[in-house]
Structure formats: structure tokens, C-alpha cells
Image (cartoon, coloured by chain):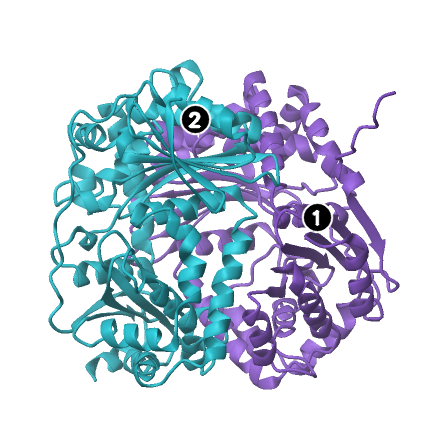
Amino acid sequence: MMKPMKNNSFVARTRRFQLSNGVTLLVLENHANPTVSLAGSMRAGEYFSPAGKDSLAGVTASMLGKGTRRRSKLEIAEELESAGARVGLSSNTFTVSVSGLSLSRDLPMIVSTLAEELREPAFPAEELEKMRQRIIANIQEEQDDTRVRAYDRMTQLVFPEGSPFHQTPAEKAIGQIESITVDDIREFHQKFYGPSSMILAVVGDVRADDAYALFEEKLGKWQGAPEAVIDITETQLQPAAIRETVVMKDKPNADVVIGHASRLRRSNPDFIAARIANNALGQSTLSSRLGLKVRDEMGLTYGINSSFAESGIGDGPFVITVTVAPENISLAVGATVEIVNDYIANGIREDELKDEQSSIIGSFKIGLATNGGLASQLAASELFGLGVKYLDEYPTLVSTITKSDVDEAIRKYIHPEVATTVVAGTI
Amino acid sequence: MAFTKITEYDGITEYKLDSNDLKLLLAPRRAAPVVAFMVLYRVGSRNEAVGHTGATHLLEHMLFKGTPTYNKHNGTQIASVLQRQGGVFNADTWFDRTRYYEMLPSDQLELAVHLEADRMRNSFIADEDRQSEMTVVRNELERGENEPSNVLHERLWAAAFREHPYHHPTIGWRSDVEGMATSRLKEFYDTFYHPNNATAIVVGDFDESAALDLMSRHFNPIPPSPAPIPQMYTVEPPQEGEIRFTLRRTGQLGLINVGWHIPEATHPDTGALTMLDTLLSAGITSRLYQALVETQMAVDVGAQAFQFIDPGLFMLHITLRPGVTHAEAERVGLEVIERMKTEDVPEKELQKAKNMITTQMIYLRDSPLGVARVIAEAEAVANWKMFVDLPKMVEQVTPADIKRVVTTYLTEDNRTVGWFIPKQEEGIDSNDEAYEE
């Protein structure tokens, strides 16, 4: 008789639990090292910030780490740092991310801390003041960065005010930060932080049942806000191309950002075809079409890339970025547009498609080789409603994409003729 | 067998290839089906002089331009071949070393080994490639010049080192990068890129005997260098008195860098210096964070012991909050240091720093490439065994050791201080007034 094969699939290795308050918990045991990684999300990101206080979600996430009703920020830090452990929250466009890392024996410490911060935050006024000053200084510092200036300006031209992808201009952002109060933060926390949209993935040296018991004990009774709903309309392509320059002083290097609304979300059925379409064009500076021409052959840049910058819950921009000396801007932009137009006209080559497929599958495997990478992927698959099985199916889904799938995605999602080009530098 | 086993230490085995003295380190870790391969050359910007500063780094770029086997004309361009496998790959250059690495699915180890063996001696160093790659590197340099923090850091090393080649940045001086002849790069390649000047490192999911077989097949045919590898002998004389400088250009936030000369990586004080940077700036409970960031004088602080083959620097950096003067922040930062000369670090605080360092080393084991990088860094500046020994070295550090290293090295005469004072487009910069004090 044949011995049954050991099932190594992610579905077979991952345990899925629902805490009594609705938190989804995924646990994958890996006992190779005495460590545990934690990743997850909750729908309480910048999208939920009220008009006129665009950074409230971000400030709230950071303030959760600034002390609870039981312990000060410093007492919490003292305990975590003494164990070399970390856990924290940070906000993204739509979600708040949870991340944590500890030795396996300290998992209870990071879970308790996370639960305490979520359930009993103190939001001390003096910590808000410190954070306000730091954020303002950071915004000022970013104003000195050609890349940030070009990118932010592109989003302001491509996405309407109020869109989560429209970056708030610096001066306005500083004014808004100054107006945020502790009451605003408390209200935001009450309104949007809750267990029903919370996803947590734990990977590492812990028994799944023990992890479940631990999370149920610390977090299972938390009753926060009801599930927050995201309803975002698709941003349409602009009617015509725009070109703008952000003039800065003393910058030997300029940054060019070419962008437009992508209309691509993670839930689009042709998402994988679109990813392959992008990768062949500009995912790698060293080996994609743009890099092979503009860097390797013409020697104009250290870095040129393209990406669907925020194609997740919503449809962010499609972006091409290139760094270049000011005297080479038109040469680099001209070559870039020519390459993109040729790509749209002729599509991906069969050999290119094959290479990109094996590249995506290989890099997916490499990404899943660490506890941290695996925890992030598990949490992301759950967030996008794809489920754990997606990790097992992904290589097959990638390898069944055809040239006509990719060519269609190129024509659908890449539109240099109506793109916005912003140059930031000493020009 | 073509390899001689030299030693085995904490799960890492060292071999020497008999035919050409290539050093090989094998660290099998079978947690996931990936493998990292790295080749470290003992050549960096430390081996350069004026006229060809940046040669090591430019040469590193040239090693992606191909060989008769791997090149874009036959569809096997190095980056494309690795990208096809979804690999993480690159190369980097620093003062003491240059390293080339790949992390790949474990069934692709041979690709990495073959490619690295091939480009060790067969790289095209062609003039037309040099011309287009020089401008790529020049753009890399310009990107660095965009960042005030990067410029200040480079100026500090240039000020603190007068004679030793740590004086110049790894990327090189702009005019050297522009003017360097292809023949000079070829000479560099032919002088330093030989198996007896390299260490190959394999970490991750592989079978030891299969890896030895692969290594022997691809590296055995490469002869050792025809001449001994030239040794760098310039010594930095002691600094006799504080050095100060200012950098003014358009910018937003003021910056302070302070550097003190410290001994080479093999020195017995390395453990204490590593602990010192953790005590000063790791985490929000650290001393500089508490003194400067919590008090709202700074946006960011950091401390790092840069230890190399030759004596390096212990560095502090402070990013000022708007409205705070350079003089004020510098005074507070240096007071933190001065206090450590007279007061013992409490045992509990010392233990916290030790835990932070040792857990960090444990976290690192999650990634084969992370392990390979740290082994390579230890091998470049001292010996790979330092990677294994670091937690032990740190564990032995006492409060008296901390006091001693601060008192011995972090002195006024041994110090270089650089201020970046932003010139703003309008209004009066309060930091300007600070400089006049």
C-alpha cells in the first residue's frame, strides 16, 4: 500500500480561527527558529480621516503606541526593548497595519501589549504635542526631497481633492496637523477601531492551539467599532497630458514622475496579467525594458521603474519614475515614452512573458521563505478576500496567463498619451 | 577532494579550495527552500588613491556588463538570467570589500555559482560599456549629493581622515569617476579579482557535498593570482585637536555629525563599542533619544561604531528640530557622552542592550541572505567567526568597559564635528545665529 503523501500546501499547514468577537486569526507553525512574526490589518486607514484632517488616521495609529491607561509609553518601551521585541500599528491608505516580532517565549508580551494599546489607549496630550512637532519637521524635511515633491505633485494633478491617493500639499498638511485634538483622536478610535475587520497572521515557533488561546484571552472580548465600509469610486483617466515642474535649489539630480489613474484594483480579474504587463516594462531597473534602454544602453539614470503604485483595495496611480541629471531630462523622458509606445503597439514578446512568469513565481517563493514574509502574505490574501488557498494557487494562476491577456492589460492600463509628468529639481 | 576542511564553528564550515586558495563558508539552514550565495572580494575604496577614487565601485557596476557566456547579445544578460528565477541579487562596495550576491530558489544554486565563477575572471571590461556605465554611476553620485545628510557624512570622513583612504567616499570624487580610464579599471580587476582574494559564502537550503561538488567544478579551474595581492599600508596619524566644519546649502532641517577615531574591528574593544552605540541610540529608551528627541530638541538621533580593517569612527548624528540651535543640541548630545565617563551604566540598562543585540542576531537567522550579509561583513573587516562570537563578546562587556572606551576614545582632541546649516529661501534662519556663538 502507498503511504499517504505529506500535504505541504499552505492550506494544510495554516490553521484558521475566529475569535469570539470576530477577529480572524491565521496561524502557521514553523519551528526552525525560536521566533514569531505577526502581521495583520484593520480597516481604519487614511481613507476614514474626516475632510480637513487628512492625517487623523495616521496620528491615531501612532498615538496608540504612546501609552495606555495602565502604562506610560516609556514603561511599555522598557518592557519590549528589554526583550528585543517589537509590536506596533501604522496607517496606510485604507487599513492600519499591525506588525510584531519577538522570541517565541515573548509572544504573550507582544500580544498583551497590542491588546492593551487597542483597548485602553490613553492618548496623552503631551505625547500628541511631541508627535505634532515631529510630523511637521518630517513634512518640512520631505520638502527637500526631489522624489517626494515630484510624486506628491503628480497625485495632486491626477486625483481629485478628497481622493485617498491625493497627497495633501505640505502647507495645508501642517495646518491640519496643528488643528488635531485629543478629542478628534479619541473619536476616530471609537468610530473605526474594532475587531470585525481585524485580520492577524502569526508565523513561527508557536503551537496553533496555544496561539489561539492566547489571542482569545487577550483580544477576544474586545468590543470596538462595527465594521467600517469602504466605498470608493474609480478615478477616471484625465482628458489630456499635463506637464509641470517643481523648482528646487541645489539639487544635482532631478526626479521625474510620470503617472496617471490606473483603474486597477486587486479585485480586477486581470490583475495578474496587469502585473506581468508592468514587470516586463519597468519592475527591475537592471532587466526590464525601460532599464535596459535608459540605464544600461543610454547610461542616463541610476534608477528607472514602473509600477501600479497602490493597486489594492482601491485603484491608485500607474507610475514611471526616473532619476536623472537636469541636462538629461528630455532625453530620458523622450526615450521612456518611445519605449512605452512601442510596448503598447507591439505587446509583450513570448520569451519576455515566459521570463516574467518564472520571475514572479520564483520571487513569490523567495518572499515566502521568511516568517515575516509569510505572515504578511497570509494577512494580505485574507484582506483581499483571496483566502489561504491563493498562496497555493498563485504559481498556477501566473503560469496560465497568455500573451493576449498581457497585451490586453497593457492597452487597458497603460496610457502615456494622457499621463501627467512632473519634474522636480534645479531646473 | 579538491577542498580542505579548515574548521567548523557553530554550524558554519570553512573550506579552502586546494588549487587556488579560494575560501568557502557553508552554512546550511533548511527552514525554507531558498539559498543565498555570495562572493566577497577583499578590495574596496580602501585600495584606491586620488585619480582613481571610485574605481572599485565602478568596476562592480562593470561586472554586470557581461562575459562571453553571460551577455545581452546572446540573451543571457546577467541581470535578466537572475531576474528570470525571481532572484534577489545585486552587488555592493564599501571601504574594505566588494560583494556580489544572489538569493534564489534552492534548485538554482548552480546558476549563482556558475555566474560568479565566470565573472571572477571573464568579465568584459569594455570601453564602450565604461562610458555608458560611468554616467549611470555619476547619476548615483548626484542622487547622493541631493541629500544633505549624505553630503555631511562624506565631509565628516574626509575631515577626520587626512592620510588614510577612508578619507574619500566609496563612490569616489566626481572628477575621478568621470575621468577614469577603462585600462585603470581593467588593471584593478586583474589585480584584485582572484580566488585567493575572495571568500564564497553559501547559506540556506542545500546539501553540503553537492555544494562542494558544484564549487569545485566551477571554481577549481580558476588559477590563483599571478602576483601576490598588494597590501594597503597607509596609516592615519593620531588626530591632534578637534576639527570643525560647516556645510551650507539649501535645505530644511539642521544636522550635526560628530565622529571620533576608534580602533580596528579586531581590537578587543569592539564588543564594548557595539554596546555603546546600542546604549546611546537603539530604541526610545536609549540615552540620546531621551536627551534629544523626547525633549523636542531633535527629530532624529543615531550613534554607530563604524569598525573596519583599519581604525574607523564612532559617529553621532542629530537632525535638529526647527528653532533649535546647533550649539544647544550639540552641547546636550556631548553631555550625554561626558556623563558616561564618570557614571557607571546600570546593570539593568546594560542587560537590555545585550538582549537587543542578541535577539537581533536570532531574528536575522530567518533570512539566508541576511545571514550571508552579516557573515560577509565580519569576514571583510576581521574574520567570519566574529559573526558567531559577537553575542559572546557583547555578553562579556561590563560597566567599567563602557566607561573605559568612552573615556579613551570619545575625547575632544579626537573629535570631528560637522554642522549642516540649511540656507532657506526666505526668512532668517535661526540656525545661522547659532553658528555665530
Disc 2 element: helix
Q: Which chain is cyan?
A: B
- Tell which tag, 2 or 1, sits nearer the viewer: 2
State the quadrant of the N terminus of chain B: top left
- Left or right: residue A169 compared with residue B382: right
State the quadrant of the C terminus of chain B: bottom left
Q: Which residue is mark 2?
A: B113
User: Residue B412: x and y, percent?
Assistant: 20, 77
**Gap in Å between the C-alphas at discs 2 and 1?**
34 Å
Q: Which label belongs to residue A380?
A: 1
Write down the colour of chain A: purple
Q: Residue at x 47, y 24 (%)?
A: B111
- Left or right: residue A16 compared with residue B65: right
Figure check: B374 above or below A195 = above
Q: Nearer the viewer, residue A42 or B120?
A: B120
Q: Amino acid at mark 1?
A: Ala
Q: Amino acid at mark 2?
A: Val
Q: Nearer the viewer, residue A21 or A57?
A: A21
User: Residue A398: x and y, percent?
Assistant: 68, 28
Work out whether residue B416 can be spotted.
Answer: yes
Q: Residue at x 34, y 74 (%)?
A: B402
Work out whether residue A313 can be spotted.
Answer: no
Disc 1 element: helix
Q: Chain of mark 1?
A: A
